[in-house]
Amino acid sequence: MQPLIKMQEFPSHPAGAPVVLTAANVTKAYAGRPVLRGVSLELRAGERLALTGPSGSGKSTLLNCLGGVDRADGGSIRFNQLALETLDADALTEVRRRDIGTIFQFFHLLPTLTAAENVELPLQLNGVPPAQRAVRVRHLLDRVGVAGRALAFPGELSGGEMQRVAIARALAHQPAVLLADEPTGNLDSRNGAIILELLRELSDETGTALLLVTHSGAATHICHREIHLRDGLIAGARDRD
């Protein structure tokens, strides 16, 4: 079988890094209709994994299960060796708040908060002292290139600026895993390319693992591996030796 993507297009794979997220035979159905039918994968620290497939293949459902937003019906999901299916709602919320960052296609910034306040919110929820929060927020906004927009509200930002703020917010609490659901799907090609390069640079700098749901061929090029879903099953998986 031919590779889904030419292997030379992938960056070096962090093969020796520890596994931070594992899914084993994960299943999920809605109203009796199977959406995931036994999906298994693993994600290593610092690794970027592209999850591709047609609409309705189960990509977003899998992402929600891996992130603890939704519970799988069967199988096991382990985050840093902690089995998510064994956790109650409060413990699951704590894992998400402490260890997982999420980036959405439509940004999901709170409209009544400034860019800086949106980035600061995860730090507030985790009880980080105000002085430390301020330093972290300034650093992140500067790193993603929107320091000059710190006091702007989301409605005053461009799409590219909103996604940069969303990335800063997702990384604010230094998560072990970053989940991105079509993060360039609502951007033009130029801003999409900038955001992808920013994600690549930041994951390299921080060692944060990135699981990227995408329809974009360009997005797969920043990843070490690609898993292709079809009808709730893995139809192909390729990585670089």
Image (cartoon, rainbow, N blue to C red):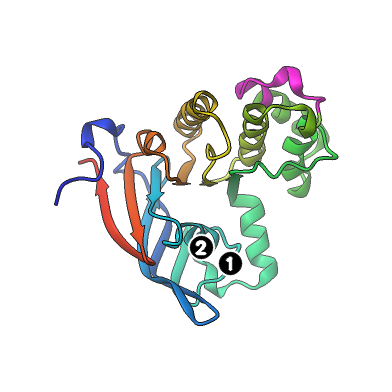
Could you say where residue 114 lies in the image, as x and y percent from the top left?
81, 32
In the image, residue 96 sits, relative to residue 198, either above or below, namely: below
| Residue 42 falls left or right of residue 188 | left
In the image, residue 185 sits, relative to residue 205, either above or below, namely: below
The three-letter amino acid code for the residue at tag 1 is Asp
Could you say where residue 212 lies in the image, as x and y percent from the top left?
46, 45
Asked if residue 43 is among those painted magenta in the image, a careful observer would answer no
Q: Residue tagged by mark 1?
A: 70
- Say which mark, if any, is on residue 181: none
Q: Sequence-wise, which precedes: disc 1 or disc 2? A: 2
The three-letter amino acid code for the residue at tag 2 is Thr
Q: Nearer the viewer, residue 129 or 236?
A: 236
Mark 2 burial class by Cα count in 10 Å: few <14, some 14-19, many 20+ = many
Q: Choose mark 1 or mark 2, whichever is in front.
A: 2
Mark 1 touches mark 2? (CB < 8 Å) = yes
| Residue 28 falls left or right of residue 144 | left
Q: Nearer the viewer, residue 156 or 195?
A: 156
- SS type, badge 1: loop
Range of magenta residues: 141-152
Q: Residue tagged by mark 2?
A: 61
* Quarter-of-image position of residue 132: top right
